[in-house]
Every structure is written in C-alpha cells, then in structure tokens.
Image (cartoon, rainbow, N blue to C red):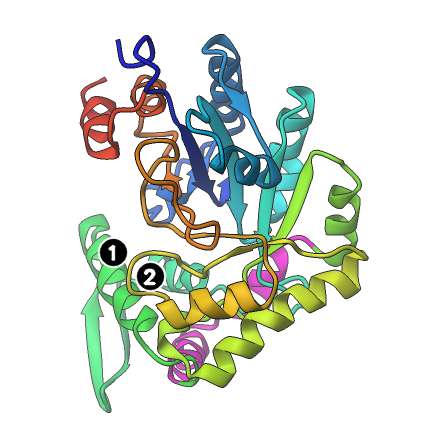
Amino acid sequence: MAQARGRSCGVILRFERVRPTRKAKFQPLRSREITPQFLDRLLRALRRWNCDVVSPDEVLARLAQPRPGPFVCLTFDGGSRDLITFGHPVLARHKAPFAVYLPTAFPDGLGEAWWMALEQVIAEHDRIGLVIDHAERHFDTATIDDKYRVFRFLGSWLRALPPQELTAAVHDLCARYGVDVLRLTREAVMSWEELARLALDPQVTIGSATVNYPRLANVGDAVSQREIAMGGAVLRAALGRDAAHFAYPYGERGSFTSRDVRIVEQAGYASAVSAIPGVIGLGESPSPQMLPRIAWDGRRSSLRGLRVLLSGVMPGAAAQLSRRY
C-alpha cells in the first residue's frame, strides 16, 4: 500500500564482515556479519522488488530527487579480508555496486581492532582481570552468559576511553593473556595489494574511515582534523584515486560531533555516512555529510522487514516486523 502511494525510499545498509556460519557459541560480533548465502538472497530479493542497488555517488544524485527510491546502497566497514574472499564473488556475480570504508592504519599493519582482541581473550578464559580506574578488577567469564555480559561491559568502557588510554588498556589486556592484537588485525584485514585488486572493479567505491579509527568525540580538534584529512590522503597515495566518501568511526550518536561534520565537509568529502538509523526520501533530505545507515543482521533480521523499510515505513516498525517474521 505504501509503495502504491509513492512512499518508497532509499536505504544505506551497513555491514562489516561476510563469512560462512561459525559454530562457536560465543560470537559477540556476529551482528556485524552476514553470510555469503544471505548476501546472495538479499541481492536476488532486491531484483525481485525492482529495487536499485546503487553506489554512494548515485545516492548523492538521488538526494535531489523528491521520490528517490526504492534503492539500497551496500556499505562494508573495516576492509575485512573475508569481503574479498566471500563477499566480492557474490557481489560481482550480481554486478552490484558497493562501498568499503577503510581505516588506513589497518592495511598498513599498524591498526588495532581491539574488539577482536577482547573477543579472543574472553573466549579463551574463564576469568580475566585488568586495571580499570587505577584499580585491579576481575571478571568471571566461565559461562556463555558471563562472556557476553563482560564483553558488553568492557566494550562500552574501552570505547569511551581517549585513544591513548584505550591503547594502554588493550595492550595491558593482550599482554596478560598472550594475544597479539596487531597480528590479529593484520590477519583479518585486507592488505594494500588486495585492496588495489579490489579497486580495479568499477563497481567498488573505497572510502575513508580515518587513519586509526578513533571515536572522534574523544579527541581534540587537531587530532580530529588530522585523522579525517590523512585518511583520505593515504588512500589517494596508495590507490591513486581520490577518496570522495567518508564514514565516521563507530558512527552512532555521540561518537562524533558537529565539529567533525564541519571538518569532513572542509576536507572535501562529497558524502559521509553515520551509523544513525534512518531512510532517504521521506520528508527533508539529510545532509550529504550526515547520511543515515541501518545495520542489518542477516542472521536475525528478515528480508520481509527490509521490504517494509523500503516501502517507506519507519525503521522502528520495520524492526518489529523483522522480529515477527
């Protein structure tokens, strides 16, 4: 009914990893993943629904249209290696454009995906300890419920720390439990050679997500300026093309500020995506430097719910339908 009334809209979907289903009971980052099978089902469904799969450049073109949808823009954060192994073959088979947002320190071998290190430490131990607010704290992680509870608590605590304190806390945790966070990150993220091969596909857009992926709200003006500008500069030097599009690290409300939006605009990025849920085409168009994205968990959220979302129903209602079906 909504589509018949011309209420269809556009959606930018946010994913991170594409890999086969794993059997491990403790998978705190699973909501950031989709399987190759779900990606294939998604692309087939979009074709059935006559929904265009578009690039970030096309999203900007449609912002000026009063009825831009239905369309979907597929985006992947982090530059995970399994995207080129499991995701790109599916996307290429469907000739689907997509965007990758990259923290440039990761393919340099200098970035630290601390959330992966935290997952590994908790998964391998029944009790862990670290220093929080200058005091030694210990946590029971023997059961699966305990592991999820501790991961949520420590993940929220680490994310709120300034970059230097975050690095110190992660290094302390990894030293205690024998986890090499640099090696873990290098193994999970594409190298520059792999990214260069991926960039040869004209359907691929590679954008910046800063250099070190800091929570921008936790850093000063100079650091924010440097992270935002240098991310694009490194991509330009490594791949020989301008990085026209940007993703705010983490991207949820409170992780970046209006200062960072201004810096992104001044740095010359044509668009910037957040992780704040929303759709494009209902009411006032969003700013190109504040585009909404919806994280879609292919293991828990249904394609029926996505179709409702594309029809112009607001995200809250679509979430209710995805749980029902």
Mark 2 / mark 1, whichever is N-terminal: 2
* Residue at (80% x, 41% y) in the render: 200
* Placement of the N terminus among the 4 image quadrants: top left
Query: CA–CA distance between discs 2 and 1?
Result: 6 Å
Q: Nearer the viewer, residue 8 or 94?
A: 8
* Residue at (38% x, 76% y) in the render: 173
Label annotation for residue 203:
none
289 horizontally vs 106: left or right: left
For badge 2, the amino acid type reads Ile
- Quickly name the residue at label 1: 147
* Placement of the C terminus among the 4 image quadrants: top left
Q: Nearer the viewer, residue 9 or 211?
A: 9
Q: Quadrant of residue 234?
A: bottom right
Give residue 64's position: percent from left, percent from top.
Answer: 49, 36
Up-down: is 104 above or below 89?
below
Asked if residue 167 is among those painted magenta in the image, a careful observer would answer yes
| Mark 1 Cα-neighbour bin, 10 Å: few <14, some 14–19, many ≥20 | many
* Residue at (24% x, 30% y) in the render: 314
112 horizontally vs 197: left or right: left
Q: Residue furthest bottom?
A: 134
Q: Are marks 2 and 1 in contact (CB under 8 Å)?
A: yes
Magenta region: 165-190
For badge 1, the amino acid type reads Lys
Label annotation for residue 122:
2
Give residue 32's position: percent from left, percent from top.
Answer: 41, 44
Up-down: is 279 above or below 32?
above
Give residue 208's position: percent from left, percent from top.
Answer: 59, 58
* Residue at (44% x, 69% y) in the render: 260
